[in-house]
Image (cartoon, grey):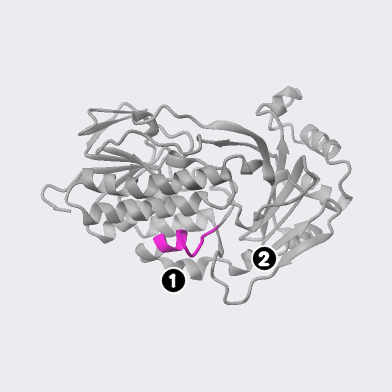
Amino acid sequence: MPTTPPPRIAVVGAGPGGLACARILARHGIAATVYDRDAGPDARDQGGTLDLHADNGQLALREAGLLEEFFRLSRPEGQEMRQLDPSGAVLFHHVPEPDERFKPEIDRRVLRDLLLGSLPPGTVRWGHTLRAVTGPSEGPRRLHFADGTTVECDLVIGADGAWSAVRRAVSDATPRYTGVSFLEAWFHDVTARHPDIAELVGQGSAAAADGERGLFAQANGGDHIRVYVIQRAPADWITDAGLGPQDTDKLRALLLERFRDWSPRMRRLISDNDGPYVDRPIHALPAGHIWQHSPSVTLLGDAAHLMPPLGVGVNHALLDACELALALARHDTVGEAVRAYEDTMLPRSTETSRLLDGAVHDLVSTELPDFAAADAH
């Protein structure tokens, strides 16, 4: 891409996709500014653990020059997977080989810190909540932030997740509730404080289901475990019960009643958590979400193709980021690059989202999907 004048590129969202895009662009001499609504990198919990696959997420980290550092920071032992029944009996157990690198685990915070540390100083502008994108389709575009400031740019990259503000500039689509709800529970210092749960879960993931509800547990770094209580339920099932997310004791009692037929050992994954639960209803964009091409706005990751948490989310976001950055480096104009990127990304995301459409309901099936790949939000 010609460097005179250089394109003004704004990436909205400092998640893995947005940061990876900025990093790969920087490696090709193309500057981008990343805007994020968080006050800083430590403003909130970044979520659980991720498995980055050799055929997508790891490809992006290789282009970013960070693959070997990722392997150093990742947890290959996290590829262990146990499938249990409601009694706690082991139905299936995968133990990874010592040199297995297909999808090692890494905590979201660690991955984000890796990407942040690789960027030129000042790349990320914190405390910028995007309200709207205006301007003609051919550009330039103007970003309007909540604090009243505006920024003009030639390309806006929407990497701002499920409820993307950038998406509204090119699409009327909004995420829909899938009918399945996750309730997240945390366990800290598990070796000393929760040894039975640590033994049950192992070094990777463990899952069980009975056809209507399920439990999915992930070992995280730092001696933590996250458990996701999975139910087919209305989106407002907590308020329907007259409760709020902070009513920990009453929620615990309700869950224990719903899981009353499960063994006491499995029910401890619900009852022994440290601190409150976190409500995470699962939303998805319509399968095959596309938008009318604009040379000045495009999307990646959940902003483009929000899918159920079945192991593809961050991996596809990283692959999107890689392909978009490489297209911008290889084409003469921003418009040509965006067209080339979308011609590859949209068919891929359409195929994947159609395969996964409705698959979130399998999360409570007794015929469990590959929970070891789960990329829970």
- Label 2 packing within 10 angstroms: few (<14), some (14-19), many (20+): many
Picture residue at 49% right of the left edge, 51% below the top: 314
Could one spot residue 351 in this view of the protein?
Answer: yes
Question: Which residue is at 71% across, 42% downward?
Answer: 230
Which type of secondary structure does the marked residue at label 1 adopt?
Answer: helix
Is 88 a magenta residue?
no
Quick check: is 52 in the magenta stretch? yes
- Tell whether 315 sits left or right of 243: left
Q: How many marks?
A: 2
Q: Which residues are magenta?
A: 51-60
79 horizontally vs 43: left or right? right
Among numbered discs 2 and 1, the one appearing first in the sequence = 1
Q: Which mark is residue 248?
A: none
Mark in the foreground, 2 or 1: 2
- Give residue 80's mark: 2
Residue 81 in percent (x, y) is at 69, 62
Q: Where is residue 150 drawn, in percent x and y? A: 27, 30
Q: In this rendering, would 301 be left or right of 34? A: right
Name the residue carrying label 1: 68
Is residue 145 found left or right of 70 in the rendered image?
left
Q: Quadrant of the C terminus?
A: top right
Q: Amino acid at mark 2?
A: Glu
Calculate the distance from the C-alpha at mark 2 to the C-alpha at mark 1: 21 Å
Viewer-closest of 126 and 288: 288
Residue 247 falls in image quadrant: top right
Residue for point 83% across, 47% down: 267
Q: Position of residue 28 (x, y in %)?
A: 24, 60
